[in-house]
Image (cartoon, rainbow, N blue to C red):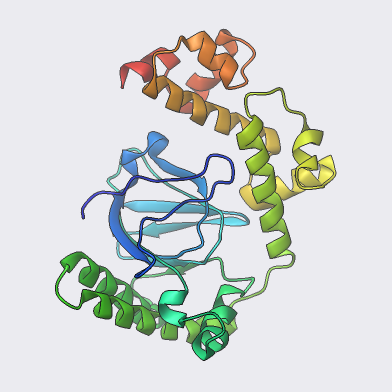
Amino acid sequence: MESCSISRVNPVTKHETVDHSAAFPYHSDCCDLHDYPGNQFSWHWHREIEIFYMREGRLEYALPGGNAVFEAGDGGFLNSNVLHLSSCRQEDACRQEEQQFLPELIGGFPGSLVMQKYVQPVLEAPGLTLLPLRAGEAAHAPLLDAICRAYEASQSGRAGYELEVQSALLDFWLALYRLSPSFAPRRNAAVDDQRIKRMIAYIAAHYGDKLSLGEIAQAAYLSPRACNRCFQEQLGTTPFGYLLEYRVQKARELLLAGTEPVGEIALQCGFGSSSYFGKIFLEKTGMTPSDCRKKR
């Protein structure tokens, strides 16, 4: 498969449903973020573990607490349930070989020895959200090799490829587990993660309304000051900065998908007037709402 699968992200919770079977909970594809609006896959999370390899281009992952950039030849490990956004530059091709799988594929049933001793400690390591794997770094070579072997086997479709995929993933996990003592813990990581998910879910459900900072904060039982701190530390922006970006994203989707007047879309997305909407849309996207619609 040489194109990215259609994403299914719940617009409120930001939970992505990954396309795989219950019998073999694994999925792989090759993604080019230029297929997505704004050259990015917006904030989302999934229970599946994600591993990837950069075939070409330059890719940036944004996570609560920081960003990481990946060049061609690099790879990475993204832990289960981690909120993230990925983006690429408009001028560059960006092709990423991506694999997602549930922990049970390598750990077996819940409560098994392998799950308890080797899988769960990595999943619960508070300092391990995104691990960059760099081309040319000796300690990362076994992990990158295992990623590439699993991907090649999955795309081949040959008899027994599932066993090859599982074998390569086990090799990857063993190498990852041996690195795990060096992962530094982050204080309050799990608590802050749940708080930011609650607040962006509230914004997704009410972005068309006139929202106050207090209402956003209340979604996570925080004070306005703590709400601001949480957004800054987790997403690198303010609550209203995130809200504005989300409104522009939803407006772009409506402009490309339907024929509603621009003024109606502006009101649906929480902008007070068409003129203000046009000004902000131009600042954020580099084009007017009308030009965006013409691209459809």
* Quadrant position of residue 21: bottom left
Residue 72 in percent (x, y) is at 30, 60
Is residue 65 in view? yes
In the rendered view, would you say 62 is above or below 168? Answer: above
**Does residue 91 appear to the left or right of 103 in the view shown?**
left
Report the residue at 71% width, 52% height from top.
195
- Nearest the viewer among 291 and 43 is 43
Residue 12 in percent (x, y) is at 58, 40
Residue 146 in percent (x, y) is at 31, 78
In the rendered view, would you say 258 is above or below 182? Answer: above
Q: Residue furthest front?
A: 23
Report the residue at 32% width, 79% height from top.
166
- Nearest the viewer among 173 and 162 is 162
* Quadrant position of residue 141: bottom left
- Nearest the viewer among 80 and 157 is 157
**Does residue 248 appear to the left or right of 238 in the view shown?**
left
- Nearest the viewer among 146 and 68 is 146
Q: Quadrant of the N terminus?
A: bottom left
Is residue 56 in view? no
In the rendered view, would you say 4 is above or below 271? Answer: below
Residue 285 in percent (x, y) is at 45, 26
**Does residue 70 appear to the left or right of 276 in the view shown?**
left
Q: Quadrant of the C terminus?
A: top left
Report the residue at 31% width, 49% height from top.
5
